[in-house]
Image (tube, helix red, strand yellow):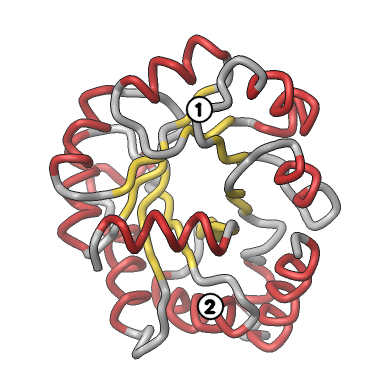
Amino acid sequence: MNKQEVLEAILERKIVAIFRGIDPERCSEAANALYAGGVAICEVTFDQNEVEGGYASTVNSIKNILAGKGDRAIFCGAGTVLTCEQVVLAYNAGASFIITPNTDPEVIDLANSLGMVTMPGAFSATEAVIAYQAGADFVKIFPAVIGGPAYIKAIRGPLSHIPFTAVGGVDEKNAKSFLDAGCVGLGIGGNLVSKKLISEGKYDELTALARTYVNAIS
């Protein structure tokens, strides 16, 4: 899977499902259930408290999603990537993109050198420009809920050349508004990747929830 395919998938599909604190053994079934509902892009976040364990949960979750996807066009990346070590771990696990809550030029540069799509986090215009000039493919406005779609629209005025995504507080009620304001993609966590549904094995309901979000942005 090359970088261009990942870029095109994000632009076409719009929604990145954020897996945070999900049992690695359930991630594959959850990803397949989301795919059945039209959500094909998954981000597995690093838990910074797992450093002594080599971030095994994140690494194994990524591997499980990719091993269990079969011929489905499921794209999997890593989130909350804060260090170059985590970039390498994600890459070796098979991740095709990284998403960060902050902007670290060294992390962006390494991921780019490995052919991964990069989506660093920013909030102000200054941070967004720094991220983009550092080589970001997308710039994630985080947490997007603070300014809402109005903030996205305002920041895009002078920075319309930067492809923005919205993450943090996005749900089925405001998702379309963020896209209408100019975002090219959305990161959605617990509102979509329901820990409760996954822990209870209610994958049909997870598929239905994914379909709700896909319909909401159509």
Give the residue at mark 1: 161
Mark 2 element type? helix
Q: Amino acid at mark 2?
A: Ala
Which quadrant is the N terminus positioned in? bottom left
Q: Position of residue 60 (x, y in %)?
A: 29, 67
165 to the left or right of 138: right
Residue occupying the point 68% across, 72% down: 210
Where is residue 110 shown, x and y percent of the image? Answer: 17, 36
Q: Residues within 10 Å of mark 2 (few under 14, many from 20)?
A: many
Give the vertical position of 217 relative to 108 (above or below).
below
Instruction: Identify the residue shown where x is 51% and y is 36%.
Output: 163
Image-based side of 186 in relation to 209, left or right: left
Instruction: Name the spot of residue 156 as percent of width and height, x first.
Output: 64, 24
> Mark number for residue 129?
none
Name the foreground residue: 213 vs 205: 213
> In front here: 196 or 97?
97
Q: How many marks?
A: 2
Report how far apart the C-alphas of labels 1 and 2 lie in the structure.
Answer: 35 Å
Image-based side of 216 in relation to 86, left or right:
right
| Among the 4 quarters of the image, the one containing residue 33 | bottom right
Q: Residue type at mark 1: give it.
A: His
Q: Name the one closer to the observer, 10 or 212.
A: 10
Q: In the image, what residue occupies the spot 48% across and 65% down?
A: 41
Q: Is residue 61 above or below residue 169?
A: below
- 213, above or below 144, in the image: below
Of residues 25 and 156, which is closer to you in this image? 156
Residue that carries the numbered disc 2 in the rendered image? 30
